[in-house]
Amino acid sequence: MSTNSSALTAPNKKTKLSLASFFIKYAIYLILLALVIVLSFATDKFLTVSNVISILKQISIQSIVAIGMTMIVLLGQIDLSVGSVVAFSGIISAMLMKSGMPIPLAILVSTLLSCVIGLVSGIVTAKYKVHAFLVTLATQTAVRGMDYIISGGYPVSSLPKSFMQIGGGYLGIIPVPVIIMLVFYAVFIFILNSTTFGRSIYAVGGNAESSRLSGINVEKIKVIVFVVTAALASVGGVILSSRLMSGAPDTGTGWEMDCITGVIIGGTSMFGGEGTLQGTFIGMLFVGVLSNGMVLLGINPYMQQVIKGLVILAAVILNSYKRKD
Amino acid sequence: MGQGESNERSSVQVRVEMKHMDENTILKVEGITKTFAGIVALDHVDFSLKKGEIHALVGANGAGKSTLIKILTGAYKADSGKIFLNGKEVIILNPHQANQLGISAVYQEFSLINQLSVAENIYMGKLPCKDFKVLKKVDWQQMNQNAQEVLGMMETPIDTKALVGNLSVAQKQLVEIAKALSNNSSILIMDEPTASLTDNDIENMMNVVKGLAKKGISIIYVSHRLEELPLIANRISVFRDGKYVKTLNIEDAPKNVIIENMVGRAISNNKRCGCSEEETLLEIKSFSSGKKFKDVNFCLKKGEILGLAGLAGAGRTELVRAIFGADPKDSGEVFIKGKEVKIKSPIDAKKCGIGFITENRKEEGVILGQTIRDNIGITVLKELAEKLVINRKKENELAGSYINSLSIKARNCEQITKDLSGGNQQKVVIAKWLATHPSILIMDEPTRGIDVGSKDQIYELMDSLAKQGFGIIMISSDIPEVLQVSDRVLVMAAGKITAMLENQDLTQEIILNLATTQI
């Protein structure tokens, strides 16, 4: 009885203490806001339309890949292979276009082939109960090797001119990749919040055994998430090769870590089950703003890395407080 | 008033005991009380142990044996009461101190590290070292020699350099004992030492234990296997509901006397009137799975609550998990309403109209970090969705209706499940299964760890579900609960069904007897 009544009175206490927990809950938003204000005063260039658009353009491709990473981390897993898949789909689509295949078909085929990579990672992770860190460490290495073999080690260039529109085009003043990014975020926020698939991801990440005993096909959900993540990495690869007008085997290197950084700063728990795509977007934006600001302030590039590292550390500590709260 | 009386009594006892505390009594416990969050686990418990005796502790689950052991080994601190060792009062603050006082325990779960040698395991945390200036170097020779001495005292030939991972279960158990003895223990506490051993190994281990007793080591021996006690124990102390009942010499304690003392509790007479109908809902035929359970057959009728009684480790949970498809089985057939069904996963079981409320609520029941609504909706996501998109309104209504009908105490359906009391969490688990409109509910220890008020509500709920025509299988280790709730009682022991009884004129004695029978 006493536990019940305390559970009932708890909310009142919380609303009184809300200032601290409000700050912790929305810390990343508030810190981003503070950063924007500081940078606006510190440099003339920061708060200009062209600079803001350039930041968004800068983060757009990685942010699309980070959508997949968010779902993977929500499952309590990790996917190290996304960077290799970005290069893979860039090379495949570039080669197909060069050989005369229509652009949409080339994109479709390269994405389907990327999905096969995700399928392999997903099946091994789900069926053999191996942590995805190990599985995707293997696929990351193997796919990167394939990237070099397929491309012969050189960028695949001289692509059809019209392909440039995807990565380099503008709609009014807004770059096409930014629009693609916003559409993908809108679609996947809907999927995560409102579909059986999205809710199953949260359930499996929150407690896989409980979900299994509740009649959710845990293995199927895991496999699908890995396939979708590979597909999103492939989309990123296509846009990148369009922007560069070539598919190169060394693109996407280290992107898995950049994506994980955005996901973690955005407040998603590495243990799974907790986190949002909105958070990931803010996390990616935060890193983008920080990098942009440091460049504008003329900070030494090596120092920029140190600062970025410290920011990640601070975000991780902040999120651990959030969870305790 | 009762408190004052017992204090007075115990102070008298102290005086008497101090005189009588000859070299024969090594350990004496007086008036130990321990409560957990208001629930009394031990209530003014007395206990004494003689030098070189094997003293068995018996009692049903929750009788207080484990709590007493944990107090003696310093894992818990008693709220009140005194402990005398060799006539001197001692205060045991932590396990390390207990070891120093010569009290060591061997638990059911092995604490050994498979990758290390026998000798390293025995001297874990106290490796004999040669001291150099900066580094300490392990003295392997000394360690192996010491380990050999300990194992020699037990008359157990085990190679001290062997890897523990390569030993049999019985040998590991013996290494565990050696590890406890290596503290120069004078008191050895053993918790269910034979639970995981085969008959041959049990005999061997008993001989080792008896040998130790002859050498003057006193042994506290906890066991559920009442049959084995005459073979090993000198005396038996019975516990019931956190209270010490009495101590008997083994000659005066045949099984029926022990059981009589273990039970004692009056059973409330509001047994269910057998309102079960004759229609058979579920039939289980020749279910077997390795050593977990063998050739199990039973049926469940419509409107019936079937109690599944037995001691821990009897294979009840394993059986129902196999029925539900949560674990694989070797063989067995399931019939629902006369039709054979293949259940290979919980997904199949759900389709067949079976719901499963697991015994580990927090690990397997709820998703603690998520809302009540999300937890209730998890089993029926497809039904809540139109073309894969979940209808939020429908979902809120579903959660709201169960919050009302099961009287779940919560602010609203968006409260995080972690913040609910145990009883209310259990109701959330029940709600998520009721949402699937099942005809059969399997409830594994449905009232474990929840407060008395919620318990009664869950009994009422089970009763009303049965009246609506549900078939319920309830596993419970609390025999009075089984007798109170069930229409029929199925008793399991060592993976087999030892009896199937109508709940008429049943007593705790009858059930305990069947639960401790090996066939």
Image: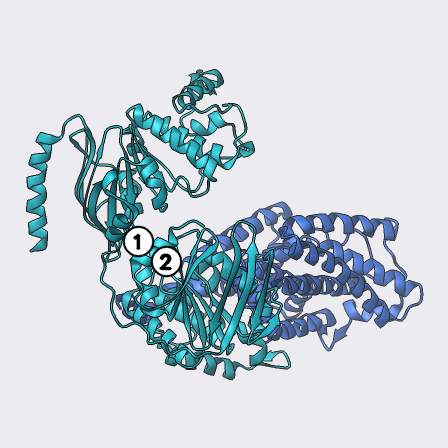
Chain colours: A blue, B cyan
Q: Secondary structure at mark 1?
A: loop
Question: What quarter of the picture does the N terminus of chain B occupy?
Answer: bottom left
Residue B326 visible, this orientation: no
Image quadrant of residue B126?
Answer: top left
* Residue in the image at 34% along x and 36% along y: B231
Mark 2 and mark 1 in contact? Answer it, CB < 8 Å: yes
Q: Earlier in the sequence, mark 2 or mark 1?
A: 1
Q: Is residue B445 left or right of residue B249?
A: right
How many numbered marks are there? 2
Q: Identify residue type, mark 2.
A: Ser
* Residue in the image at 83% along x and 66% along y: A109
* Label drawn at residue A202: none
Q: Is residue A284 above or below residue A179?
A: above
Residue B388 image point, x, y percent: 63, 78
Q: Which chain is home to disc 2?
A: B
Q: Is residue A288 left or right of residue B48?
A: right
The residues tagged by marks 2 and 1 sit, at their Cα atoms, a distance apart of 9 Å
Furthest residue in direction right, as rendered: A100
Give neighbour class at mark 1: few <14, some 14-19, many 20+ (Cα, 10 Å): some
* Residue sitting nearer the eye, A120 or A142: A120
* Label drawn at residue B477: 2
Q: Is residue B445 left or right of residue A46?
A: left
* Residue in the image at 52% along x and 31% along y: B164
Residue A163 image point, x, y percent: 84, 69
Question: Which residue matches tag 1?
Answer: B62
Q: Identify residue type, mark 1.
A: Gly
